[in-house]
Amino acid sequence: MRAGDGVALRPVLTLQPMKPPTPGHPANRRAPLVLACLLLFPPALQAANWPQWRGPLFNGSSGETGLPDSCDPAKAKWVAAMPGASYATPIVWGERIFVTSTDLASKGLLALCVDARDGKIHWQKRLGNEIKAPQNNGVTPSAATDGKVVYFLFGSGDLAALDVDGNSLWKRDLVKDYGNLCTKFGYSSSPLLWQGKLYVQILRRSKPYSGPAGIDGDLASLILALDPLTGKTLWQHVRPCAAVDESCESYCSPIPFDNPTRKELLIQGGDCISGHDPATGDEFWRLDYNPQRETNWRLIPSPVTVGDTIVVNKPRGGPLLAIKAGGKGELKPDALAWTYDERTSDSGTPLVYQGLIYVLQSDKNDPWARGSKSSPGIFLLAIDPATGKETGRCQLAKGGAWRTSPTGADGKIYVMSEEGEVVVVSAGPNGKILSRATYADGPACASIVAANGCLFIRTGTKLTCIGK
């Protein structure tokens, strides 16, 4: 997530950079005002695109406005049929949407470019072979783009860079280079494109569940930094851990943290979260959250950051932990700013939006629920990032599976169940349900995307555009 057989249906315009004005030009006199706007309102200026998995701000939020209160599929602007299912979030840049799909006919892994204006497919490429994994497929990782190149990574280990017109630039086979990706439910981490590097994490068991290891000896957990222009490895860092069996595995994605102290790459899984130097991969700090060495604590939700705090969702719907920035070495309990001890999410990554943290509970039968005071059912929780106190909750359903990560935009929170029910909730500590819409097109595990005045919803067999 080999160049395929897709053919571009029509050319797409590529925006060219504007030439700087000459000295004395009136535009130069506006420069201080423009700079002030960039500093004061960065979310709104970045909101037009959704360039990678958790959006322009890496936290599930967007500065988009004018979005609908309802996602009724009967009022869709357009609906595009997809070749197969995918759990990957659509990636949007301008008038292009980059999505992935399985192909039932060829058992292939596909990359597609869809026109955001009308849903027509510009091109389709076959980049790998489908993998066998329980409750998952090979197109779970989301793509990433800078508007010029789009990067697709698949659960098969196929990693490819294409230009926005679908031309192949480079390809790699991570399984060939680094061995079996070795996660029980299928490799699912999305690549991170940040500050001139493409980051990939491979947190896995030392022995594969099935198939050959692909290399001699035990498999190591790795963090990779690649050159986006060539695909060559700039550095690789071995990330050891004390985890046992399935707890070694992580399905989450690397998250950047630009805090007042330094820039960090946040990596979670293998019973701990760690902060790394993005230039070298060297580890600044780590926090172990499973000293009992439970063996089934595989991790799905990624960390999020709020100001100078890192918020971590423990596995299996466990507590939230807030970690102070600037840590060094093995962190002790005093490194925590707060802990939220109620049932949270086993699957979805928290959302940070308008001063609150939102957590979508994934399943009322999450193991942590057995020891939690939380009421049964599926709730959207609102947490104060300064104190970790719950400020409110909105019940979405009595049960079911809710695997997506919530999206925040235009004063609303957009969430979707695995069966394809989309619920819109007003943002704030006392959120209210604004609407419900049934797509009945599961499995639906991709987060809803807000970009360019529209919502893009990927369900089992369709990509739907909703807008006013």
Image: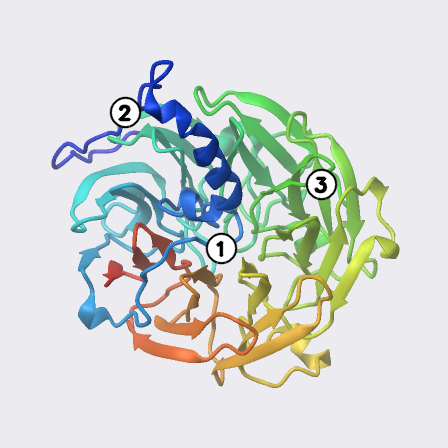
Quarter of the picture holding the C terminus: bottom left
Looking at numbered disc 3 in the image, what kind of residue is underneath it?
A: Gly
Can the viewer see residue 242 in this picture? Answer: no
Return the mark for residue 305. none
Q: Would you name the residue on which mark 1 appears?
A: 60
Looking at numbered disc 1 in the image, what kind of residue is underneath it?
A: Gly
Q: Would you name the residue on which mark 2 appears?
A: 16
Packing grade of label 2 (10 A; few <14, some 14-19, many >=20) is few
Looking at numbered disc 2 in the image, what kind of residue is underneath it?
A: Gln
Q: CA distance from mark 1 to mark 2?
A: 28 Å
Circle 2 SS class: loop
Residue 226: x %, y % from top left:
53, 26
- Up-down relation of residue 15 to residue 1 (above or below): above
| N-terminal label among 3 and 1 | 1
| N-terminal label among 3 and 2 | 2
Packing grade of label 1 (10 A; few <14, some 14-19, many >=20) is many
Name the mark nearer the viewer: 3 or 2: 2
Name the mark nearer the viewer: 1 or 2: 2
Q: Residue furthest top?
A: 23
Circle 1 SS class: loop
Write down the quadrant of residue 298 in the picture.
bottom right
- Rendered image coloring scheme: rainbow
